[in-house]
Image: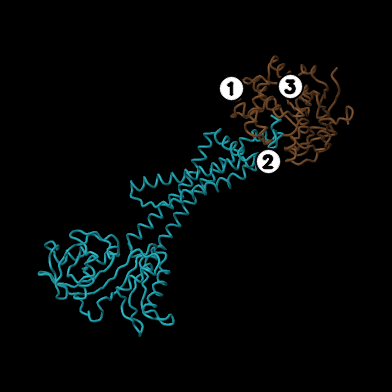
Chain colours: A cyan, B brown
Amino acid sequence: MKVADIFREAIWGLASRPARTSATLIALAISVATVALVAGVLGGFERRIEQMSFGAYGRSLVIRENFFIVDRVGSPRLSDIERLRRSVPGVESAAAWRILFGAEVDTRTVHGQTEIYGVYGDFRREASAPLAVGRHISDDEASTARRICVLGDQAARRFFPDDTALGRTLRINGVSCEVIGVLGEPQNRIAERYSGAILTTFGASARYFTYNTVMAPDEASQITLVLNDGRHLDRAQMWADRTLRRRYGVPFSQASPFLYADPTASVRSLRQQRELVARLLFVIAGVGLISGLIGYGSAVAAAASERRREVALRRTLGASKSDIVLQFLTENAVLGVLGGALGGVLALVIGVAASRAWNWPIDFEPSVFGASALIGLFCGLVFGALPARRAASAPPAGAVRT
Amino acid sequence: MTRGDRPARLKATGVSRRYRRSGGGDVVALDAADFEAQGGELVLIMGPSGSGKSTLLAIIGLLDPADDGAVFLNGIDVTRAGEDERARLRRTHLGFLFQDAGLIDRKPILDNTALPLIYRGVPRRERENRAQAALEAVGLADRMHHAPGELSGGERQRAGLARAIVCNPDILICDEPTAALDAATAQDVARRISEMKERGAAVILATHDRDLVPLADRIYEMRHGRITEAGAPT
């Protein structure tokens, strides 16, 4: 029997029983859709939780001076940024920060202490908060010594409780600074650290520092490299360390001159919790899938049983057992692929609807559809194999004895 | 050898078949039957229901193996042929016509008729041409796109005959082909079946119908699984 004829007979076998075929198809589609939907929702929630918790910081490599060694080379420098961007793979953006804790801040009416961040480079990605009023410090301004600043939302309310902060002047450790913008609500937990702080230009920040003699003008408290993919932080750290060792002439036999903070350490515990929930959801989806597949298998077996006379006739007319097995397996493979693909589409439709109705974060990779079709094909072949063998074993003499 | 040096198209010697009862013990459906059919000969197997006609047909039609005895096809012993080999022999040498025509319900008559050719690996276009010619030969050219359910009993039986002859078989095996038909239709179907022997095929009919006796070259009478009489009609 030719392959095209096997395929044609299989399609006929499905098309000739539209009600049963549709019911079987829907049973399989619902089973596959359950798993695809769970995968899509989990992916979406993962992305949202990480975004809400850490923003870009969750995939950042943070480089600071290593204070724990004797032969220190000092803090990382602005000039290191370009070098690191060239050598470390997958860097999306980079920024330098000069951080002063407990700076004295004075307005005419309020006095208090807060943190000052001198910023350079693409700092906005980490200081993830929209502007409420005014403007941000531009890239050009960040490298100058202009005494301008942007206040976090809490800092603005704290130091200018009765009036708008925009355009006003405050004094940081006795040095004046003009407010050019105020940040809005932080968009993730990391950005909350800037809520009560003041961001100013990297160049001007040295003026506000009480220990400015400790840091050279181009030295930063830390450099942050935001990566395309947070999973590659270890590799990025290796390349950054290699680059900076070469830059400062520190051999691998000595301790690294810099510390590499791992912001994902805190993400990891969160991920572990999420993975527990994910496993639970997958178990539930798996039970749903198995229940659906048992129904699918029963339907396929019942369909094969109903067709024993047809099979006996075909065998009488010269079909071999393998012809019958191939025909039934092809029917189930086609049914499986269609059911799987339909399941993928169903999951997408439900996902999009749920996303719109209840703001579910759905994250469907295009590969979900291929995987759904493959799951369907696998189920079709596995659950179709036994009925196919049973059908093929129908004795041809049954066609005579009717 | 029979009739000079020509081997019989189909020959069975001492074939028996037993079935196991559900309550234990065996029932003998066929007991040491000898059978022979030549090319160009119409052979009737007659007897009441339960006499073993269908069992004998199943064995000589290579649908069911015999427990004892031997079956020869064109002089070759096929008693021990495996299932796939018997399937190959069926599609190469045999055509079948059943009491209810044995058509697949949801397939158009043309596709039903072409079905045996699929298992012979005949290309689609040629299959359709040959099926069309077979349907024309039985007078169903205008019904080829109809489903079996849309045909009368006689038309269905003629469609079954078209499918049985589409491969030009050496042997045509018919099980009660006229049992469910009125007298006139039965006569028409019987006439068309007997045309096959003119083409040189061995035609074997299991039937109750005494009206078919005049067409027969040889008759086997069966009772209780045994062949009680064999010979030319008197």
* Quarter-of-image position of residue A211: bottom left
Residue type beneath disc 2? Lys
Instruction: Give x and y (percent) for residue B52.
Output: 78, 29
Residue type beneath disc 3? Ile
Say few, some or many: other residues with alpha carbon within 10 Å of mark 2 (under 14 / 14 to 19 / 20 or more): many
Q: Identify residue for label 1.
A: B150
- Residue A111 visible in the shown view: no
Instruction: Give x and y (percent) for residue A225.
Output: 34, 68
Q: Which mark is residue A316?
A: none
Instruction: Give x and y (percent) for residue A142.
Output: 23, 68
Looking at this rendering, what residue extends furthest in the bottom direction? A70
Between the C-alphas of marks 3 and 1, the distance is 23 Å
Looking at this rendering, what residue extends furthest in the left direction? A108
Q: Quadrant of the N terminus of chain A?
A: top right
Q: Identify residue for label 2.
A: A321
User: Left or right: where does residue A342 sit relative to residue A8?
Assistant: left
Q: Secondary structure beneath disc 2? A: helix
Q: Secondary structure beneath disc 1? A: helix
Q: Are marks 2 and 3 in contact (CB under 8 Å)?
A: no
- Residue A206 visible in the shown view: yes
Q: Secondary structure beneath disc 3? A: helix
Say few, some or many: other residues with alpha carbon within 10 Å of mark 1 (under 14 / 14 to 19 / 20 or more): some
Q: Identify residue for label 3.
A: B193
User: Left or right: where does residue A159 sit relative to residue B162?
Assistant: left
Foreground label between 3 and 1: 3
